[in-house]
């Protein structure tokens, strides 16, 4: 039986970096991957979607050319085969890069196949059983299949099968009005599809403050995307024209008929076929592996990193998991998951960059909340670029002067929010940031401005 110092199951956003760190520290490492090197982000998540968002942005800007005094002759047409080819090119570079780096690492052996625990120290892959004193689980997640009536009767797409779409769906119906559904929705609308987004909740991305949700809904509607909110009783069935989606909405007809259906209703951890019971590794009721603040499972010698531990659902959280585990094991550090400040982006155009608490969360936690807020139509740089949709806001605690969070939903929002995030990590009191001199003209120059315009929070939800 091949024996290693460490076995890593899955090559998502934590596994490959951890494999290389351990191998470079002289440990003998086995890495197991059952499908595509680099996992979700590289193959069916961040990289391909943001590459396609860029194509959609190009189409949108071309259509708006006349507004900027640029004449484009004839109608704007999107060649979906070329969009896909561009996306495939970027993805191939990433995934082959991950595989090449792993295979060229002297102390690292790559196994291709499905890994399953046989015992707390053994993992089977194909016909081989590998053993190690340390095992790291980085198996990620996949699109969930909710118990929706008729789902087994119809063809539907997920974020993975969307990657093979090289044609323009005539009418794409998306079930799920959160991050993934919204990104695909705006993208395909801009490619030229009719798009309907069906959402059970009364508003889009209910995790965000109501004003941010409303600004997102306004942009989607303005671009011609139909929103069917409060769809409390979603049912699916086959139809001559494609798929009928029954929606029990407060307004509008009870059924939407589309040519294609994308299910974007959340993710589930890839832990159901991992032999966790044989290793004794505990999960919660949703299948997420239970870990402590240093990402150790209940079984000594087994760690879980990335989406499968339920502590994050992003590439940067998975990568941060790697940094925590590597620093604690190899550098004698004591880094913890609870040290990190929540941060993420929603890649619409304009993007939403988020750091820390929302206004509603801050209120619920009992802070005495002050808010600085401004529509992007009053941000000079956004006006100059003709990107005036959205809103930016910063949330602070009046008593402690702590910066609690920010939402920058506007031009460059995914980048701008990092100025606030870094100030939060530095634990800078907000008056310090208010006095900072920023570059003109930028969206970031409004961060000090907003901090000079604070007012008490009125309940945003
Ligand atoms: C459409 C979409 C867009 C996204 N956009 C963003 C974004 O813009 N920014 C962002 O931060 N995040 C984004 N995400 C989330 C991001 O992709 C994930 O959070 C990230 O990939 C999680 O990485 P991970 O390390 O947990 O595992 P994953 O990337 O999911 O990789 C897990 C790997 O393990 C392998 N595996 C699973 N089980 C086994 C097994 N038993 N044996 C062997 N191998 C196994 C899988 O094949 C896979 O390669 C997006 C996700 C989706 C779906």
Image (spheres, helix red, strand yellow):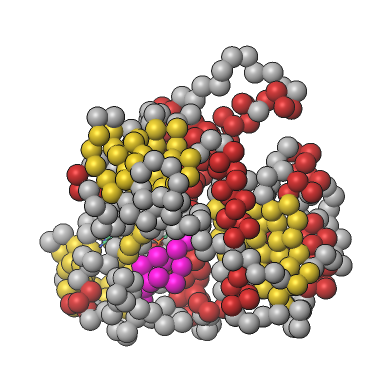
Occupied quadrant, residue 432: bottom right
What is the x, y in percent for residue 300? 32, 85
* Quadrant of picture, ligand 1: bottom left
Residue at coordinates 44% horizontally, 58% vertically from top-left? Answer: 201
Q: Which residues are magenta?
A: 303-316
Is residue 93 inside the magenta stretch?
Answer: no
Left or right, 243 with respect to 350, comes to: left
What is the x, y in percent for residue 181? 44, 48
* Depth check, front residue: 110 or 421: 421
* Depth check, front residue: 350 or 230: 230
Q: Is residue 276 above or below residue 14?
A: below
User: Can you name the residue that lies furthest to the left here?
Assistant: 127
**Residue 164 in view of the camera:** no
Residue at coordinates 29% horizontally, 63% vertically from top-left? Answer: 270
Is residue 304 inside the magenta stretch?
Answer: yes
- Which quarter of the figure is the C terminus placed in? bottom right
Residue at coordinates 38% horizontally, 71% vertically from top-left? Answer: 309
* Depth check, front residue: 138 or 193: 193
Left or right, 408 with respect to 308, comes to: right
Q: Is residue 330 above or below residue 69?
A: below
**Residue 307 in view of the camera:** yes
What is the x, y in percent for residue 337? 50, 77
What is the x, y in percent for residue 36? 32, 50
Left or right, 279 with respect to 336, comes to: left
Q: Is residue 403 above or below residue 400?
A: above
Occupied quadrant, residue 269: bottom left
Residue at coordinates 57% horizontally, 36% vertically from top-left? Answer: 223
């Amino acid at each position: 039986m091949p024996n290693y110092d460490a076995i890593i199951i899955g090559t998502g956003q934590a596994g490959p970096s951890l494999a290389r760190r351990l191998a470079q520290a002289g440990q003998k490492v086995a890495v197991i991957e059952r499908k595509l090197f680099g996992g979700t982000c590289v193959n069916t998540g961040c990289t391909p979607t943001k590459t396609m968002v860029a194509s959609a942005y190009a189409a949108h800007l071309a259509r708006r050319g006349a507004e900027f005094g640029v004449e484009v002759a004839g109608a704007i047409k999107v060649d979906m085969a070329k969009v896909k080819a561009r996306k495939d090119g970027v993805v191939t570079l990433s995934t082959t890069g991950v595989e090449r780096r792993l295979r060229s690492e002297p102390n690292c052996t790559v196994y291709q196949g499905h890994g399953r625990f046989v015992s707390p120290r053994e993992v089977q892959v194909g016909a081989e059983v590998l053993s190690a004193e340390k095992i790291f689980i980085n198996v990620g997640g996949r699109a969930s299949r909710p118990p929706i009536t008729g789902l087994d009767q119809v063809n539907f797409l997920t974020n993975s099968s969307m990657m093979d779409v090289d044609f323009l769906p005539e009418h794409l119906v998306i079930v799920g009005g959160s991050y993934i559904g919204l990104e695909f929705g705006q993208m395909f609308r801009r490619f030229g599809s009719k798009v309907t987004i069906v959402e059970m909740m009364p508003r889009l991305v209910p995790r965000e403050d109501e004003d941010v949700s409303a600004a997102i809904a306004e942009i989607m509607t303005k671009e011609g995307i139909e929103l069917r909110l409060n769809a409390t009783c979603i049912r699916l069935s086959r139809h001559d024209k494609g798929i009928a989606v029954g929606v029990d909405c407060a307004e509008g007809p009870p059924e939407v008929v589309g040519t294609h259906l994308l299910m974007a209703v959340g993710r589930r951890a890839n832990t159901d076929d991992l032999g966790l019971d044989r290793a004794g590794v505990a999960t919660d009721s949703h299948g997420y592996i239970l870990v402590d603040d240093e990402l150790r499972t209940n079984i000594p010698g087994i760690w879980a990193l990335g989406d499968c531990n339920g502590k994050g659902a992003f590439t940067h959280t998975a990568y941060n998991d790697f940094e925590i585990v590597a620093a604690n094991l190899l550098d004698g550090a004591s880094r913890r998951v609870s040290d990190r400040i929540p941060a993420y982006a929603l890649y619409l155009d304009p993007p939403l960059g988020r750091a820390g608490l929302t206004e509603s969360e801050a209120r619920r936690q009992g802070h005495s909340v002050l808010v600085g807020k401004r529509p992007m139509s009053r941000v000079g740089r956004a006006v100059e670029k003709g990107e005036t949709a959205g809103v930016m806001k910063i949330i602070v605690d009046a008593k402690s002067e702590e910066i609690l969070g920010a939402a920058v939903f506007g031009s460059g929002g995914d980048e701008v929010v990092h100025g606030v995030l870094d100030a939060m990590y530095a634990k800078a009191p907000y008056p310090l940031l208010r006095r900072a001199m920023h570059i003109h003209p930028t969206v970031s120059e409004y961060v000090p401005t907003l901090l000079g315009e604070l007012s008490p929070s009125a309940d945003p939800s």
